[in-house]
Image (cartoon, coloured by chain):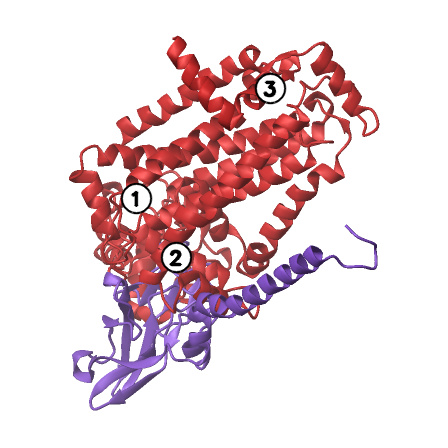
Chain colours: A purple, B red
Amino acid sequence: MSDENNISRRGLFMKLGILFNGLVATALAVPFVRFLSSSVTRGRSGSYLSWVPLGRVNEFPEGETRLATFRNPYVMPTDGKTVDTACWVRRVEGEQFQVFAVNCAHLGCPVRWFPQSGLFMCPCHGGAYYRDGSRASGPPERGLFEYPTKIENGLITIQAGELPTPGASLALLGKKPPCES
Amino acid sequence: MRVLAQIGDWFDRRLQLAAPIREAAEHPVPRNTASWFYVFGSAALTVFLLQLVTGIMLALIYVPSAGEAWSSLQALNHDVTLGWFIRAMHGWGSNFMVAIVLIHMVQVFLFGAHKFPRELTWILGVFLLLMTLGMAFSGQVLRFDQDAYWGLGIGASIVSRVPIAGPAIVKLMLGGPIIAGATLSRFFALHVFVIPGMLIGFVCLHVLMVLKLGINEWPMPGRIVRRATYINEYHDLTKKAGAPFVPYAIWKDLFFAAFVLLAVAVCALYFGPFGPTGQPDPTIIQTVPKPDYFFLWLYALLSLLPPSLETPFLLIGPVLAITGLLLLPFLSGEGEKSWRRRPIAVLTVLLIAITLGTFTHLAGYTPWSPDMNAWSGDVIPEQFLHRTSALERQGALVFQVKQCRNCHSLGDLGGQRGPALDSVAVRLTQDQLIRQVIQGGGNMPAYGKNLSPAETTALVAFLETLHPAGQAPARDASRDIVLGEDQAERQAAQR
């Protein structure tokens, strides 16, 4: 090594080499991070959500709650059966519908409908909901998640595409859970 | 023999590893550490190696695709020669590894091995514990069945409660908007590449530090750790009075390691592989998801915490627990090592063990969950229907049909979510029964909208018969005055 103030030729090259590596690493970090965060950034524009038909309106008797299934709008080739999703469809009367996610608002276990007692019950931690989705008892802090619905060409259609979680996803934020009566 | 020695010599002239390996093997250890209490670290390492070997074997057949993972597990269980045994070894190996790592941690803590100068060894150990749990959870996901599917949903629900960033973290965790192919692939990458890679690195550092700093000496009550003097004192224990690790101490490690491997194999042979349970088809909702045993305590805790405390607990609890574990060697880096002089340490371990044990035990029979099939499966025992009127029998029907049984037991049959009703008439008067049925309360939903007045009357009439033979049902004394004695007596006679 030469004097303190002098930079040797090899020392300079080493520093330039480190700098060069740093530049390349920074440049590569951009596509790497974009790849890794694609599942988040894609969802930010709401592009996971679509309107999905559940069936003809007359397939759902008035005053009853039925299980319906739909295929998630966002599908990858390796998804298998996991993109088939279930939901509870309640036809209140006429063209008035409520469509609930099967996922309990507590921790997401699948709730089951008991028409005789008019309750949704969760097998995991014992959450229970009334027929309109409002909380009846147990650990959930809110009612069932409800999909936005509309009727199109005689088909009951919901806006879906994201796993409903208590952190609230886009689709389910728009609609407030039904209040307890 | 001479040829072998020559070959060995040829390699060592190039590798030059024989001398450092011999030095490491024969490093002196304090004589009293050649103890059966000091075998858990090497046992954890042994099971980890077993997991590496069996894991690689499983990867030869397993397909990490949401569409095919389940059937590739079925093929392992039923079609591939001894596939079931390798799966069972890997599953039981995982249970053993969690258990041994926890035992190792408790032993290290009670023997004061986290104190100066082994703070960093402890901290690496805490990360190794977290990675072991991470392997356990991600491994449960790779067993891509109904439990795995809904377990992921529970994980996502917990993560989503993080303020602001919650939904983004959920999508990052799931690799998309829902639990699907990308989710399994990413947990496969975690379970097979990321966490094992980190584990191998951390285990090497952990063991290296045990070699560099020396194994913790057997703690003697009254022998105080001081930063200024400890190194010299330890030096005396090893250099002057110590014995070489090989063979003086290692034979116990060897025996225990072989014993643990044998125990894993026996469990695998006797109990067989874990699952897979039903297909991961989210349209099949007739399922009662449950985590593997090391997360059962959490499952129990989440149903017993008051709802308002749950989110703070889930988000702050782990941070506090991990910070506490990481800070421990700095908060108590000196002083007594022996558990005989550290009552608070012993009590803390006992408290945590008993708490986790109790929660795990409770999660075994989930008294908080409704029994979804009790209303159709569990009959009303005959003795409750003896000498009942038509109205009361109609009430018993209502009781059955309206799923009351899912939460309430009669004669030990039925759910345990609500109180057993065998003698409810002793506790509640007629009015209180009506009120409870119609308005709900406590943990019970209101049934007012789902029962006609006739059904309510019949149901309450049946509930009023539920009292032990020698014990009168509860009655409201004020009614005697309001109704006049005659009418009240007539009513009582009707019951």
Q: Nearer the viewer, residue A93 or B157?
A: B157
Query: What residue do we see at 38% from left, 69% from top?
Result: B177
* Mark 2 lies on residue: B186
Task: Find the distance from the CA under tag 3 to the CA under tag 2.
Answer: 42 Å
Residue B361, position in %: x, y?
44, 37
Type of the residue with mark 3:
Glu
Query: Which of the two labelled residues, at mark 2 and mark 1, occupies the earlier sequence position?
Result: 1
User: Does residue B495 appear in this view?
Assistant: no
The earlier-in-sequence mark between 3 and 2 is: 3
* Above or below, comparing residue B32 to residue A7 in the picture: above
Do tags 3 and 2 sit on the same chain? yes
| Residue B386 placement, left or right of B333 | left
Query: Which of the 4 image quarters holds residue B23?
Result: top right
Residue situated in front as seen by the camera: B155 or B392:
B155
**Residue B461 percent across, percent down from the top left:** 32, 57
Distance from label 2 to label 1 (Cα)?
15 Å
Give how far across and how far down residue A37 sits, in percent.
47, 68
Q: Is the Cβ of the residue at disc 3 closer than 8 Å to that at disc 2?
A: no
Badges 2 and 1, same chain: yes
Q: How many numbered callouts?
A: 3
- Write down the quadrant of residue A121 in the picture: bottom left
> According to the image, label 1 marks what residue?
B59
Give how far across and how far down residue B103 sits, in percent.
53, 29
**Disc 1 residue type (three-letter):** Ala
What residue is disc 3 on?
B23
The disc labelled 2 sits on which kind of residue?
Arg
Inspect this view and state whether residue B406 appears.
Answer: yes
